[in-house]
Structures are given as structure tokens and as C-alpha cells.
Image (cartoon, rainbow, N blue to C red):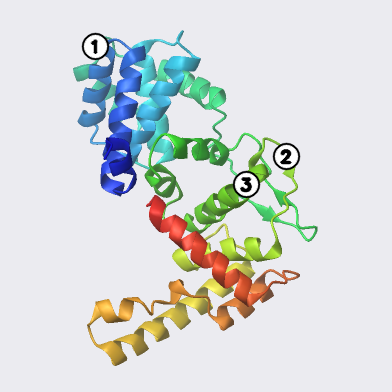
């Protein structure tokens, strides 16, 4: 069995394989000293693994697209940008302090910030202002910023694990990540670089991805949600607590027996009715949405 095939079926091995392959691809474009310094700087800053993967990706891409940038400045800038994207909370002072011990020349703060902006513009990143999605009555999916981080992040799915995407969205926005991931897989044409993109996604598919996202990660404090979605989340949380209470009463602490009854493995009729109320005008078949949700959950589990 080939190593690629083996990695595909093992998420942990796939993650390790992604880092290794990215590392060696970068090594072909950079001097051994450069890549060695970059890895030492990353370790010194105690980056989370997801942030490290993101920084290696950015470093690799910038070596190809902007070979004119100063090497030491680029190392600091991609790490700074990666920390912001992944919410790793490592500021510029932290980076310059670590750079004193691990880089030949310590870039100035202005140089690092300027290069960070160049990286953002080159890769079409706009991490501060992202309008996630809107669903209109005319059934048009609008990606309101054609240079959003979201579109670029999806390009990482081909050459690194799904982890950076999940880490970026954190818990409160995993729902949105699932929605866009599902739409990306179901209807790739929805993610062309246009301001308003018409998609032939059926009502059932759109309802399914929203339902799937909500069920995987429901947060009533999500400021990005509309009041209808927030109310839906609160009601669903109450229902979920009641559901688990009944499970515990029936099965005790036998988690294995109870697991197959977890609410996110099926689509409750009450949840579908709430969803229809929250998104007025969305008509669908409960049976169709049930099967689509199951397919999306299988896909989601495979990609974790």
C-alpha cells in the first residue's frame, strides 16, 4: 500500500504528511539556512500546529509569487499574519523579540507590517472585513467580498488538512465553515470570483448545509447570527439538553449505546420547522434534507 493511500485514511498521518510535503516543497525554493531559521523561529514562538501549517503555506506561496521580498522580513510577516488569521495571539513585539535570537538580521516593525500588507494583497486576504454570506429571497448566494479570506482558505484544502479552516472559524463559526464547505463540494460554481454568484443549489441543499452547520456548532451568543438564528440556537440548545437528559436516564453512563442516538445524526421534525421559520420562504422536503445532511456529515467526518 502506498504512503499516500495510507495517509488518506488516517487523519493524524495525513496532517503529518501535509506538513512534511509542504516543508520539502518549500525547501526546494529556499536555501537550507532560510528554512532552518524559519522553523526555529516558529518553534521559539510556540505556535499552535494549525498556525504553523498556515505560516508554512503562506511562506511557500510568497516564495513563488514574490521572490523579491526580503527573506528575514518575510519569515516574520507570514508568522504575524498567520497568528492573526488563526487567532494565536502572538503580536509583533513577540515576533521581533524571538527574531533577535534566531534570525541573522532583525527586521524593523514597519518593515514587518508593510510586508504583511503585501502578503495580504498578493493572496487576496482581507481578514478584518469579511462578509460571510447572505441568502436572498431570489435564491442568490452572494459572496459580498470577492477578495475574502474565505475563498483563499478553501484553496488550502487541496494541499493541507482541514484543520486550518476549523481553527480559523473557531467554535462559533464552524457552522459557517460547514455551510461553505458543503456548498463548495456540492456546487463548485458558487465560488467563482464574482460579487454576486447565482447558484443552482436546490432549496433542499441550502437548507441541508445550514442545518448541518447549526447541528455541529450551535452558539446562541454568535454576534454574526440574525435574531431568528439566535432564537433558533437557544431553542435547539434547550432541546438538546433535554434530549441528553433522557438519554442518560435511559442508558446511564453507557456512552457507546447512547452515541447512535445523538441528535446531530438525524434531522428532527421540530428542528426543520424552526429552520423554516427562521429562513422564511425556504421550502423543502424533510426526507431529501435528511439524506443530504447524512452525506454532508459523512464528508465532514472524513475531512476532520
Q: Quadrant of the N terminus?
A: top left
Classed neighbour count for the residue bearing mark 1: other residues with Cα under 10 Å, few (<14), some (14–19), many (≥20)? few
* Distance between mark 3 and mark 2 Cα atoms: 11 Å
Q: Position of residue 172 (x, y in %)?
A: 46, 58
Q: Position of residue 5 (x, y in %)?
A: 32, 41
> Which residue lies at the image location 24% right of the left edge and 32% below the top edge?
45
Q: Which of marks 3 and 2 is in front?
A: 2
Please tell me which of labels 3 and 2 falls first in the chain: 3
The residue singled out by tag 2 in the image is 195
Q: Which of 102 and 148 is in front in this view?
A: 148
> Picture quarter containing residue 190?
top right
> Picture quarter containing residue 121?
top right
Classed neighbour count for the residue bearing mark 3: other residues with Cα under 10 Å, few (<14), some (14–19), many (≥20)? some
Does residue 124 appear anywhere in the picture?
yes
Classed neighbour count for the residue bearing mark 2: other residues with Cα under 10 Å, few (<14), some (14–19), many (≥20)? some
The dot on residue 131 is 3
Relative to residue 178, is residue 246 depicted above or below?
below
Relative to residue 57, is residue 208 depicted above or below?
below
Name the side, left or right, on which 145 lies relative to 259: right
* Distance between mark 1 and mark 2 Cα atoms: 43 Å
Q: Position of residue 177 (x, y in %)?
A: 51, 52
> Picture quarter containing residue 192?
top right
In contact (CB < 8 Å): disc 3 and disc 2: no
> Which residue lies at the image location 36% right of the left edge and 13% below the top edge?
29
Q: Is mark 3 on a helix, strand or loop?
A: loop
Q: Is mark 2 on a helix, strand or loop?
A: loop
Relative to residue 271, is residue 203 depicted above or below?
above
Please tell me which of labels 1 and 2 falls first in the chain: 1
Q: Where is residue 284 in the image (x, y as percent from the top left)?
A: 69, 72
The dot on residue 85 is none
The residue singled out by tag 1 in the image is 33
Amino acid at each position: 500500500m502506498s504512503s499516500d493511500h495510507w495517509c488518506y485514511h488516517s487523519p493524524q498521518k495525513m496532517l503529518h504528511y501535509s506538513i512534511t510535503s509542504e516543508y520539502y516543497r518549500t525547501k526546494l525554493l529556499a536555501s537550507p539556512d532560510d528554512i532552518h531559521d524559519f522553523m526555529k523561529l516558529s518553534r521559539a514562538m510556540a505556535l499552535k500546529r494549525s498556525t504553523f501549517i498556515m505560516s508554512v503555506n503562506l511562506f511557500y506561496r510568497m516564495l513563488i509569487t514574490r521572490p523579491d521580498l526580503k527573506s528575514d522580513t518575510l519569515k516574520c510577516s507570514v508568522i504575524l499574519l498567520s497568528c492573526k488569521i488563526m487567532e494565536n495571539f502572538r503580536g509583533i513585539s513577540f515576533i521581533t523579540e524571538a527574531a533577535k535570537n534566531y534570525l541573522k538580521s532583525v527586521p524593523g516593525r514597519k518593515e514587518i507590517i508593510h510586508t504583511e500588507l503585501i502578503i495580504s494583497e498578493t493572496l487576496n486576504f482581507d481578514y478584518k472585513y469579511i462578509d460571510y454570506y447572505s441568502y436572498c429571497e431570489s435564491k442568490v448566494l452572494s459572496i459580498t467580498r470577492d477578495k475574502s479570506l474565505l475563498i483563499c482558505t478553501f484553496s488550502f484544502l487541496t494541499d493541507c488538512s482541514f484543520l486550518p479552516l476549523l481553527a480559523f472559524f473557531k467554535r462559533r463559526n464552524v457552522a459557517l465553515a460547514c455551510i461553505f464547505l458543503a456548498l463548495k463540494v456540492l456546487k463548485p460554481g458558487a465560488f467563482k470570483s464574482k460579487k454576486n454568484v447565482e447558484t443552482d443549489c436546490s432549496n433542499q441543499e441550502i437548507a441541508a448545509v445550514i442545518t448541518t452547520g447549526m447541528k455541529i456548532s450551535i452558539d446562541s451568543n454568535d454576534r454574526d447570527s440574525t435574531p431568528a438564528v439566535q432564537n433558533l440556537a437557544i431553542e435547539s440548545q434547550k432541546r438538546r439538553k433535554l434530549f441528553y437528559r433522557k438519554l442518560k436516564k435511559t442508558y446511564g453512563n453507557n456512552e457507546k449505546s447512547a452515541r447512535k442516538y445523538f441528535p446531530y445524526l438525524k434531522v428532527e421534525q421540530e428542528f426543520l420547522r424552526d429552520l423554516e421559520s427562521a429562513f422564511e420562504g425556504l421550502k423543502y422536503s424533510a426526507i431529501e434534507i435528511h439524506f443530504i445532511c447524512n452525506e454532508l456529515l459523512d464528508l465532514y467526518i472524513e475531512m476532520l
